Image (tube, grey):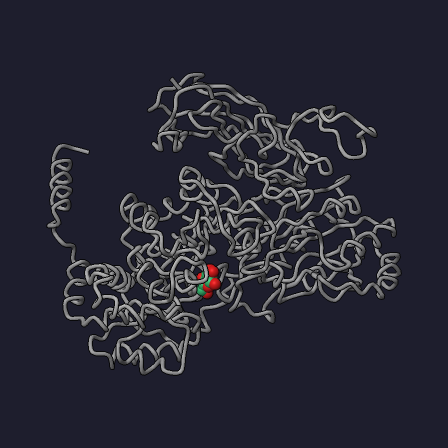
Amino acid sequence: MNLFKQTVAGTLLALAAIGCAPKSDLDRKVDDLLAQMTLREKIGQMHQVSGGADLFEAAAKGEIGSILNCVDPEAINAVQRAAVEQSRLHIPILVSRDVIHGFRTIFPIPLGLAATFDPALVEQGARVAAIEATASGVRWTFSPMLDIARDPRWGRVAEGSGEDPYLDALMGVAMVKGYQGDDFTDPSSMAACLKHFVGYGAAEGGRDYNSTMISERSLRNTYLPAFQACVDAGALSLMTSFNEIDGIPSTGNSFLLRDILRGEWDFDGMVVTDWNSSGEMVAHGYAKDLKHATELAVNAGVDMDMMSFGFATFIEELVKEGKIAEKSIDEAVRNILRLKFRLGLFENPYVDAQHARAKVYAPEHLAAAKQSAVESAILLQNRNNVLPLDKTRTILVTGPMADAPYDQLGTWAFDGEPEHTVTPLQALREEYNVIYEPGLKYSRDTDTRSFAKVRAAAACAEAVVVCVGEEAILSGEAHSLSKLHLQGAQSELIAEVRKSGKPVIVVVIAGRPLTIERDLANCDALLYSFHPGTMGGAAIADLIKGKAAPSGKTPMTFLRDAGQAPFYYNHNNTGRPCNGTETLLEDIPLHAGQTSLGCTSYYLDTGYGPLFPFGYGLSYTTFEYGNIKLNRSSFGLDDTIVVEFDLTNTGSRDGVEVAQLYTRDLVGSVVRPVKELKRFERVALTPGETKHLRFELPVAELAFWNRDMQFVVEPGAFQLWVAGDSASGTAHPFSVE
Ligand code: BGC
């Protein structure tokens, strides 16, 4: 920064500090409008509803700020007309919807998108979602979900990017950019909403809505970074979460909403509650009634109430009683109006209803959805290179997910249309002579009576493709599970076709990482596809046929058994880490002495390790990492670590590898994770090709919230890995002086 800029910036800061910074045009517009509003009109802006009999009347009186769950463009225009043409101040309504992984063209669930390790593609997908949803009048989506999820029992792991803060941040930023576009006023721009602020994914036992106990340090090191990255990327709104942390529900937590979000991060967007999360503070036992909950939420820094009706009912009284300052209401309404001005809603409140339908399912939208589904599929096993089936002609397709157009869309696909979905069965029929025998009707089906038909059909096929997994309803909100194996008789179906002696390819289509150890033993190849969306079947068929190669990597650790949860790669070490010599149940001698097994941290029945580590995934070829070199062995705080390495495709097919860089801070003022992802890159290689690659990592990115709650790099010894997953590679030492 030159001296002039520094002086100007300094003056602005000083002015801001005394409350007289020059106002931007936007602020002026907001303040002018605010000055004309009655308290009732202000309260109206803070109220969001999902339909209701008196919707039009309320809109005409200026008593509604936003609606959710309406996607009919004619109906949206009608409500908007009531607000814009009939209300005293003509303030448009903000129309919102959960557009989580696509609007009509459904992309893979966010966990699948994370498995692509391809932020550019994820941004493209979010853009498609925005183009399609805004065409119907939706200008605000409740996405991205940034909740770090370390427990696959929690059904909402489907909606986020998994267990890693760095991957989570990159995927979140990609979605924010895709939804919001370059120009917020463009009618195809849709405001993002960062959710759920915060710690919701740490629900005890993986049971949805459950309490969490997260220290401030852990919040800052693990749960907050993705939110901050998205705020820095310009996200326009944020949603408070249902959960409480250490006894304080997020919707009433001013430390989170005022001190961190507004104070430390300078967020000037809008804060909305989750669905009745303000009212639910009563059930938590944090507020004595809805009125008290309203007082707590507004004073904590919430701007808009989703569906508790507390704001609309009680704010006026609370202001009169002096329990809420009118200044706080003004602040909230400023945030809401700012968003409406930013989106250009005052100039452009209506949608072109006649052409809404023409904007969905464009060929480029379907192509992006298919590419996302291709890149999100993870090859977890491929014995004897059974895949791809490029020479096979006749296959048996079986399993309840082979032709389940609704279920493969996954959770939060309200506007997806099964009739537009391409299933694996449909797409495989384009490639092979297919014998189809479903075996089971749906994923929970336990009726094995048609297994005999499957067996007979297998005898006539050269290979068997078994599509199993989870119906959409088994993951997502309020859909937690305590057992994570395949439901119904799906494992039995796999075991049955195994008896045919034909190559068995299992395709798992599910909303979470399931415990599939038993099934791996009964198949040759296993391709894991988190609910892959509209084009999922086409992607799976291309992968099976070898027209595309798998490149997805696990965004969450895959467990051997649900009892291992929570289990994540970036954990702290115990004082007695498992050293790989664990004695398991079957090896324990009778009457063994209490300490004879060694005292390390593992389960007697499942051992220590996961089924597959974070960042893992195979391709149809193999890769080798070589010549890994650091530019130096010792670095100063302002330096950049440059890691160079060669990546070679050592197999005989084209492939894409996600090269990953991990670090470890060996000794800290607080215990540090055993590994942390710092960089990754998708690299395409032809057979035999070597690429010379480099990762650059500023030492500043080794900072963490330390014992004194300062965000610093602590000098000392570190290690670094470059590898194809979080459990491979060799440690390269370096130090920071
Ligand atoms: C969910 C949110 C969602 C909201 C609105 C809530 O139940 O937790 O993620 O955005 O509903 O549909």
616 horizontally vs 382: left or right:
left
- Position of the C terminus, as image quadrant, is top left
Residue 154 percent location from the top left of the image? 57, 53
**Which is more toward the observer, 156 or 360?**
156
Q: Is residue 51 above or below residue 97?
A: below
- Work out whether residue 185 can be spotted: yes
Q: Residue at x 44, y 52 (%)?
A: 244
Residue 504 percent location from the top left of the image? 79, 50
339 horizontally vs 539: left or right:
left
Q: Residue at x 20, y 75 (%)?
A: 89
Q: Is residue 247 above or below residue 621?
A: below
- Work out whether residue 99 can be spotted: no
**Quarter-of-image position of residue 48:** bottom left
Residue 35 percent location from the top left of the image? 14, 67
Q: Is residue 236 above or below residue 639?
A: below
621 horizontally vs 412: left or right:
right
**Which is more toward the observer, 660 or 612?**
612
- Position of the N terminus, as image quadrant, is top left
**Quarter-of-image position of residue 348:** bottom left
**Which is more toward the observer, 30 or 176?**
30
Residue 736 percent location from the top left of the image? 40, 20
